[in-house]
Amino acid sequence: MTDSIWRGAGLKEATLLLNGSAVTAELASLSISGSVNGDQEEVAVGAACARTVTIQFSGVQNGFSDGLLKVSVAAGGETLPVGTFQVIESVTRGGQTTVTAADAMLYLLDKDYVPTAGLSSAWAVLSDIADQSGVTLGASVTGFRSTLAAVDMSGLTTGHTGRTVVGWLAALCGRNAVISRAGKLEFVWYAASGFTLGQQDCYEGMDQVQESDRVFSVLAVTVTDAEGETTTLTPSGVSGSGGVIENDYMTQERLDAIWRDIGGLTYRPAELSFLGDLRLDAGDLISFTLADGTSCTVPAMNLTHTFDGGVTTQLTAAGQSETVSAAGGGVLTGKVKQLAADVAQLGALTVTDENGTTKINGGRIDTDSLFAQDITATGTISGLKLRGSDIDVETLYDEKYNSRAVIKTEYTDQVWGGTEYYYTLSLGVTYLENESNLTVDYDGIAVSAPKLKMTADLVSANLQSNETYTVFDSGLVSEGSVTVVKKLGWCLVHGSVTLTDTVSAMTNILGSAKVPAPQTGVGIYTTAGYWTSSYTRLMRVGVGAGGSLRIMYGDAGTFPFSIAYPIA
């Protein structure tokens, strides 16, 4: 791989294969996180850490759940493999989908391991784990075959994950366990990468470096025998500070041999962020030059690459990185997880930290504040307030109205009994019920109340019907124009008709579908004159008790009229 290509700021292109098929969706960013030190604050051995990738797409994407992702990056005609990862989460928020995936350390090895009967040595156990999980052993692992073959593990029982046992075996070799870019299980230790970095190459404010070197001067191992007695081993003839691990298969002889191989690592604790290089892996040693010209060695205990066309790398030495805490593993992590499970099974768990006290007891959680990404409740959630920018509550059966309700509240008077106030939002129907009633449904809005009072400087209601008719039901009307206006409980019928002769009997010229009935249930009638001559007989005009416009009498001529009346 060419330095000028991978260390430069030139454009790089990520390639994703989901279950063997190319993913063509546009990426917003790609983050790759790895560790060789797990959750240890000091240099240690026996960690079994998973690498994770987090991919954010520019739009909404589907079909990633439980998929297998193969990731690589190309630049300048060269292709750099990143690894193969199993999708563990796919979430869409704000129109963008974020996919999180982890390598085989998590999706193949972090499962309960049941040893095959008859296994005797640590090498046989490791081979059995590989066979059961489908993980391929890399060259660095097979190189320790003779070392592991000499370790008796015939007493290994169930109750551990394959990942935990792999951590034990890596520790017996003085190594940490990782999954390589090629998808193989490897045992690794810190090694020179040839990568050099100056303090001036770091982003401003992202070059936290301790003042002095730290020496990996001791490794403590706690061993618990069959009787439950615990012994702490340290390398012979050494003292100082270092990591502490648990490994019941460690002996003083093995620990001394391991220490002769890896002891005495001198390094500078630091947290650095710089224009990155995707070739760097967790476990690499880089040569770092301070602003004053001093050179030191910084190990990539935790490493995160963020790719968005260019690459930013964040490297942490001697301290747990928040980005890998979820993926960190190894012996102590596995023991702590098992201890947490055992405590929880006791029936009560109390946790006190800076956020307060949380108690879990008898199916009940008591805490001052609870944060959850998603909550599914099959019973009742009781409380005073439900707040949020987007709240969906649905599928509540409302017996009172025999419908599915979205939100329902009611108050029952404790003295007199009965429901005094009732409010429900249903699928298409809203009810507000107390001394007055409001119903909003598919047919309209109905208000029932002893009084309806509106106080405002201006009340505007665009609630009206306005229809003009020029065709009439009687041949005695030669022409005319009648407008029917309905507004806020009143109807106005006005216009004029031209008669060809006298109408001898009361005749409907517009039906009740066009002219509504009076609210009083009694017909309303008036007279209309022929303004051109005072001698022409007046026309009787009105609205019938059941509706319709009716006329009688009159003579040849045009008769204007106007009638206003209340309607139901």
Image (spheres, rainbow, N blue to C red):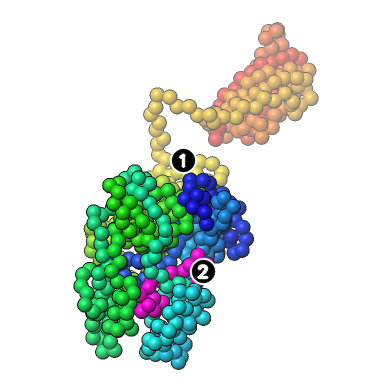
Compare residues 264 and 64 and report the one nearer the observer: 264
In the rendered structure, find residue 164 and report the number of the disc placed on it: none
Residue at the location (70% across, 7% down)? Answer: 533
Confirm whether residue 398 shows in the render: no
Q: Is residue 496 above or below residue 46?
A: above
The residue indicated by pointer 2 is 183
464 horizontally vs 151: left or right: right
Confirm whether residue 351 shows in the render: yes
Residue at the location (31% across, 56% down)? Answer: 296
Amino acid identity at mark 1:
Val
Residue at the location (74% across, 25% down)? Answer: 471
Amino acid identity at mark 2:
Gly
556 horizontally vs 134: left or right: right
**What kind of element bears circle 2?**
loop
Quarter of the view holding residue 487: top right
Compare residues 526 and 79 and report the one nearer the observer: 79
Q: Which numbered disc flags the more N-terminal residue, 1 or 2?
A: 2
Quarter of the view holding residue 380: bottom left
Residue 115 lies, in percent from the top left, at: 44, 85
Q: Tag count in the figure?
A: 2
Residue 517 lies, in percent from the top left, at: 60, 33
Q: Which residues are magenta?
A: 165-184
The residue indicated by pointer 1 is 447
Residue at the location (59% across, 64% down)? Answer: 19
